[in-house]
């Protein structure tokens, strides 16, 4: 078994694709409208779906926002330099909600950013062998 994708419902597909591709550097892998079901799917990621887990963005036509609820946590992305990633994301118009720094009660360097729909994305430094 392997993890294929995580689905997020988004209020504006073009805005979300722009964020994930232009701000976070993912690639739009595929996009398809389903007129009979009145929804659009787009898949974005850092590599092809055959070898990588990706995000499925789902836009239900006529719905421009969702309640995120209290069960959702975050998506985690490993980045080589969390401090630089925050600078780059901010420069590309992204919103950093927790500046880069050590994890509370731990040694990992992390930060949080937020996508246009309010979903949290954690940026984590690579695990280092001690």
Image (cartoon, rainbow, N blue to C red):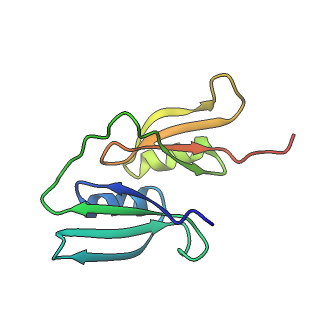
- Toward the viewer: 1 or 83? 1
> Looking at the image, which residue sits at the far top?
105
Q: Residue 66: name its quadrant.
A: top left
- Residue 61 lies left or right of residue 129; in this view the side is left
Query: Is 24 located above or below residue 76 in the figure?
Result: below
Quarter of the image with the N terminus is bottom right
- Residue 11 lies left or right of residue 99; in this view the side is left
> Looking at the image, which residue sits at the far left?
62
Q: Residue 10: image x %, image y %?
A: 28, 55
- Residue 116 lies left or right of residue 94; in this view the side is left
- Residue 15 lies left or right of residue 61; in this view the side is right
Query: Is 39 located above or below residue 36 in the figure?
Result: above
Residue plotted at (41% across, 37% down): 71
Q: Residue 3: image x %, image y %?
A: 57, 62
Residue plotted at (25% across, 61% down): 59
Residue plotted at (28% across, 58% down): 15
Query: Is 45 located above or below residue 66 in the figure?
Result: below
- Toward the viewer: 15 or 1? 1
Quarter of the image with the C terminus is top right
């Amino acid at each position: 078994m392997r993890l294929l994708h995580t689905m997020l419902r988004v209020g504006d597909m073009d805005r979300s694709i722009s964020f994930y591709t232009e701000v976070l550097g993912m690639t739009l892998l595929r996009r398809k409208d389903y007129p009979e079901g009145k929804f659009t799917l787009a898949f974005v990621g850092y590599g092809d779906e055959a070898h990588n887990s990706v995000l499925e963005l789902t836009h239900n036509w006529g719905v421009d926002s969702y309640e995120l609820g209290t069960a959702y946590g975050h998506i985690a992305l490993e980045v080589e330099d969390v401090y630089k990633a925050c600078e780059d994301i901010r420069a590309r118009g992204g919103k950093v909600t927790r500046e880069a720094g050590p994890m509370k009660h731990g040694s990992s360097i992390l930060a949080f950013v937020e996508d246009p729909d309010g979903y949290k994305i954690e940026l984590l430094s690579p695990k280092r062998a001690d």
